[in-house]
Image (tube, rainbow, N blue to C red):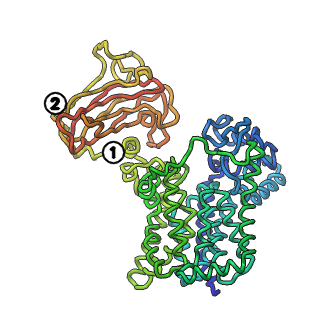
Amino acid sequence: MQVNYFRFRYLALLVGAVYLFSFGYFQRWDTSIRYGGDSWGYYGYLPATFIYGDLQDISDSYLKRFPYTNLGPHFPSPGGELPIAENGHRVIKYTCGVAILQLPFFALGHAWAGLDGGYPQDGFSFPYVFCVLLGNLFYLLLGGYLLYLLLAGHFNPKIAFWTLLVLALGTNLFNFAVYRAGMSHAYLFSLYAGLMYATWRFYAQPRQLWIILAAICAGLITLIRPVEILCLAIPLAYGLTDRAKLQERLKFWGEHWRWLLLAAVIFILCGIPQLLYWKYASGHWLFDSYPNEAFDFARAKIFSGLFSTQNGWLVYSPIMVLSLAGIVALLRKRDWLWPVLLILPLHIYIAYSWWCWYYINGFGSRPMVELYALLAIPLAYSFAFLDRRKWTSFLLVLLTIGAISLQLFQNWQHSKGVLWSEMANGAYYRSVFGKTEMSYDALVAFDSDEMQPDSTGLMKQKELVKLDFEQQDSTLDVVSSPVYRGQKALRITPEQKYASIYEGLLGAADISGRDWLQVSAYCYKEKKEFPWYTAPSIVVEFSDDKGMKKYRQVRIDSKLGNPGFSLWGGEPDHWGYVRLWVKVPRDAAPETVLKVYFMVEQQVVYADEVSVVLGK
């Protein structure tokens, strides 16, 4: 096998430099593992086993991370990282495969902390977190190397170079390499690359080494994420180009059944540590560590998972459209056809049948990252097609630069709180696209999924409501303090929950479809609410006898004391301007009912200078 190692060294130097710079720039060792969630869950086995000895109940090791956070020590609520077994023990929600891969780097961090008296050997000081997250880069680059060897065996070195470059820097694999390095997806990518490489080498030159490597990779993939057992289609279906190849394969395994048995034993052994842990901690060999979380196979959100601005795969890694297009080439170059056709549709269907189809704690659709090694094959075919002519080769360069620029910039936006992909909607995504900072309109679009217009181009027709609460009204809960202007302000309590601002028929107010309505108020709160999505809001509704036609809301907390318009900003004890523009539904009839109201569920809200304005 001839490989252009000079080209690979150049690729490794370029990608490695970007990864290491980004790793240092984002400095996620201050959060990541220490702040719980998936990253802690995969890692938690190691300090519990080797430092605190509480693997059976996780009584101490979980709490040791809190001194490195701004959170008070507490055990997670139901549905968190530590579900409770029938015997009362806390059980780590996540499987132990990632911890097995992290073990050498955990040991390195433990030795570093021991040699440097400035760091405690507590599993969460800087040496541990730095080494474990750096270990993620090691595995990723190793997997990239194996994938390069595989691609170089199928394509010319230039295509192998471009394919790896785009995957590494032009997809959301980059995010899980340097920003969320504690998660499982980069590890799975590398294991898939190892499985594919071992499969390819085994069928080209059958040796026990390759089948052992393939079995270990498949076993660890399935251990880390059990639904990835689909990966077995790679060694079983690779190279089955026609019926004759199938018959030849069956004959081969009939003659080498001992190798097949060896692979099966290794694959099963990879799962034994998890079974032993569940038995040790919960008292049962099998334990449902995801209670009250499930797949809904009858309502898979496939279109949303692929195309939604809320972490949709192809929205945040659009270059992968070329990988899907490259599947057509597999109809002629059929060695990888059946692994792709068997795994990809089932993987997508299963991934987007999960109750949380948009997968929080990610950038773009994170369950697709592990398939990038497999999807590298059709992606390379697309690149090879584009490289045939001079002008399409130039287009390939432009697409690569565009994909990498978009990925790096949007990850920077993500790190600065400008782009929050897991909760994005279309209006908010368009509002912040290409922007280096948030704006008030983008903040409102995030709440409402309504693009805010350039109000200077709208002609205000009339004011439907103007409330300053200075006149006595026995139906309103009016107070004399705090107030924004004048002597009185409105108080809305959780007991009231709703406080109407306006209600009437569109026809009565001469409002027609495509008009704009602005609702605004000055608001005040004594305390900020968590989580953000329960915060009080101002709501605009359009409904008719058939039901709700349109619903929009703007949250109050983030508009108070938030000059930088941060998604997570807002300070109590500040009067803030809360404003929302809403377009009237195009098909709204005169009989459509318009309702505008405050919605308060947990804490008292004060409002002053409330208005509803019609604009055209």
Q: Residue at x 64, y 50 (%)?
A: 39
Q: Residue at x 66, y 52 (%)?
A: 29
Question: Going by the image, does 435 lie left or right of 612?
Answer: right
Q: Is residue 2 above or below residue 582?
A: below
Q: Within 10 angstroms of label 1, few (less than 14), some, or many (20 or more) residues? A: many
Q: Position of residue 183 (x, y in %)?
A: 62, 55
Image quarter where the N terminus lies is bottom right
Q: Position of residue 586 (x, y in %)?
A: 22, 45
Q: Is residue 594 above or below residue 390?
A: above
Question: Going by the image, does 573 lie left or right of 123?
Answer: left
Q: Nearer the viewer, residue 353 or 604?
A: 353
Q: Nearer the viewer, residue 274 or 566?
A: 274
Q: Which mark is residue 508?
A: 2
Q: Nearer the viewer, mark 1 or mark 2?
A: 2
Amino acid type assigned to the residue bearing label 2 in the image: Ala
Mark 1 and mark 2: Cα distance apart in space: 25 Å
Q: Residue at x 75, y 56 (%)?
A: 272
Q: Which residue is mark 1?
A: 450
**Could you say whether the residue bearing mark 1 is in a helix, strand or loop?**
loop
Which circle's residue, 1 or 2, is located before the other in the chain?
Answer: 1
Total labels: the figure holds 2
Q: Residue at x 61, y 83 (%)?
A: 248
Image quarter where the C terminus lies is top left
Q: Nearer the viewer, residue 370 or 199?
A: 199
Q: Position of residue 190 (x, y in %)?
A: 63, 66
Please identify the quarter of the rendering in which residue 484 is found: top left
